[in-house]
Image (spheres, helix red, strand yellow):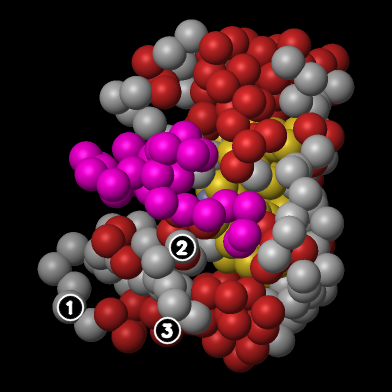
Amino acid sequence: MNITPLPLDRLCIHQVSLMQCGFRQSIDCLARHGVMQTAVWKDKLDEVGTQQGARILNDAGVTSISLCAGGFLTAATKADQQKILDDNRRWLDQAAAIGAHSMVAITGGLTAGETDINTARKRALDRLGELAPSARDAGVKIALEPLHPMVCGNRSVISSLGEANDILDKLDMPDVLGIAVDTYALWWDSKLQDEIARAAGRIINLHVSDWLNDTSDTRLDRGMMGDGHIDNRAIRGWVEATGFTGPSEVEIFSEAAWWQCNADELVATIIERATRYL
Ligand code: ZN
């Protein structure tokens, strides 16, 4: 497939990729480099408060397309389930307040000592169904994000795009529930191209980074595009074949490497790599 390089106006850089910065610093840094789209990281937003966060984005002219990450839907007790629904409703309102059109949601993992993964999956599906009307009220879509199977225990009890598609088939609320495809989480799946085709009309977000050959941490050692094994451009081609026209969103959690760099150099590197690998 011959896919043209991603134009710079479709490059989005997640705020979490600039963990070395405070909220305002990260947004100003992106704007300085002409990257006018981000996805705000919830913990960073809480540092400044929702209103101030919205003001900083507005002043810089940077759009937050998503708020990351909500969900954590596998709570087992009634009290914990109510608490997580309340939390998510607050996060949806925060997403709306900063102008984000989606909140990315991960299911969460199993609870302490639990060994019944299918029951945990059922709880995630039930909570997502309960949360959906609140998302509709807030005018924010929920983008369900399957994560890599190595983080099934503690981060996400769904690990493939096929499972996410199955859940959305069951819930059948296409106006408010969709999917975030993260190439880091899904690149290994031999059925990925087919499941992306099956997800046509559902894909809200496309997250990109790279899988390093000898990764030291499956969560916090994500690679820069071009340094690993993921063909991000080919996957973008599959996603665009479904009609998707959104940005490619660089999301690099990198505790020991990229989060230690100067933020301006990091953003310049991302832009340069984007022209070659996105
Ligand atoms: Zn992601």
Q: Does label 2 or label 1 sit earlier along the sequence? A: 1
Image coords of residue 25 (percent x, y): 62, 11
Instruction: Tell me if residue 123 can be seen.
Output: no
Q: CA distance from mark 3 to mark 1?
A: 14 Å
Report the magenta residues as a range. 210-235
* Quarter that holds the N terminus: bottom right
What distance separates the C-alpha of mark 3 from that of mark 2? Answer: 25 Å
> Picture coordinates of residue 137 (x, y %)?
81, 62
Q: Tell me what residue is drawn at x 53 percent, y 18 percent.
A: 266
Q: Which mark is residue 115?
A: 1
- Counting residues from the start of the chain, the first of labels 3 and 1 encountered is 1
Q: Amino acid at mark 2?
A: Trp
In magenta stretch: residue 263: no
Instruction: Give the numbered dot on residue 122.
Output: 3
| Residue holding disc 2 | 187
Q: How many marks?
A: 3
